Image (cartoon, rainbow, N blue to C red):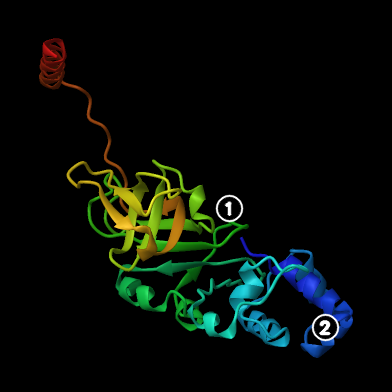
Amino acid sequence: MSNISSNLKFLRKRKGITQQQFADLNSIKRSLVGAYEEDRAEPKYELLKTFAEFYEMSMDELITDKINDKWKPKPLSDRGNLRILSISVDNSDRENIELVPIKACAGYLNGYADPEFIAELPKFHLPMFRQGTYRAFEITGDSMLPLPSETVIIGEYLENWNDLKPGDTYVFISKCEGIVFKRAGNKFKDSKTIKLVSDNPVYEPYTIPSDDILEIWKSKAYISTSFPEPTPEPTMESLTSMMTQMQKSIANIQKM
């Protein structure tokens, strides 16, 4: 979650200027300053860039750091590798969801930290997702059946990886695997690897190094143009087969 509102308010007061003075210095309306500081709206990318330059810091620091009296800016030599989460809004200042289609997946791995690349992605808005940072990824393959290939997974950015819950589904962005939609097989705490599990039993679980992971997005919803097939009514043949399988399983248990 971003700290833009509290950071802007703290930095302005530390600089000893009023909302009106800040607005005049950055060529915006004073009412916008109040909306940003009270978390009623979020500034667009160009304004964030302007504010970061005004306070002589990186955009990543302005967005993600919790700036207070104890805060210290990162050395300039470290700022080049900082990942920048884009925050895009529509004309009503509502946050949009960037879509990463299959054809853009390869480019995303190289441009995920590039605001210009993110800005070029298609965007859409869903009214139920108002708070947080969201992105949508189009998945491929059949490893997560019954969700078919080309399903769009909407994910919320997971800032603290220790909040990852085994059994829940996530979009993992990593150097070695690219963009994959899997279930988490274990927690990150005290572990240097993460196990990724497919819903399709044909695919075996596997692990990847945690330091290879670039981003994690908690799945919140999905969009698909394929509708599920109706469940067929059981026939005498299928019931007989199920009973036979159950009898075999019971016999195997009794032999243990």
Q: Quadrant of the N terminus?
A: bottom right
Residue that appears at 32% across and 68% down: 175
Q: What element carries label 1?
A: loop
- Marks 2 and 1, the one that precedes in the sequence: 2
Observer able to see residue 41: no
* Rendered position, 220 above or below 65: above
Q: What element carries label 2?
A: helix
* Rendered position, 218 above or below 125: above
* Rendered position, 245 above or below 82: above
Q: Do the residues labelled 2 and 1 touch (CB within 8 Å)?
A: no
User: Hey, which quadrant is residue 241 in on the image?
Assistant: top left
Using residue 77 as the reference point, say whether residue 205 is left or right of it: left
Q: Which amino acid does label 1 sit on?
A: Met
User: Which mark, by number, is residue 128?
Assistant: 1
User: Which mark, by number, is residue 64?
Assistant: none
Residue that appears at 10% across and 16% down: 248
Label 1: few (<14), some (14–19) or many (≥20) C-alpha neighbours in 10 Å = few
Image location (x, y in percent) of residue 168: 41, 44
Image location (x, y in percent) of residue 169: 39, 48
User: Which mark, by number, is residue 22?
Assistant: 2
Image location (x, y in percent) of residue 71: 71, 70
Instruction: Tell which of 80 and 45 is nearer to you.
Output: 80
Label 2: few (<14), some (14–19) or many (≥20) C-alpha neighbours in 10 Å = some
Image location (x, y in percent) of residue 25: 81, 89
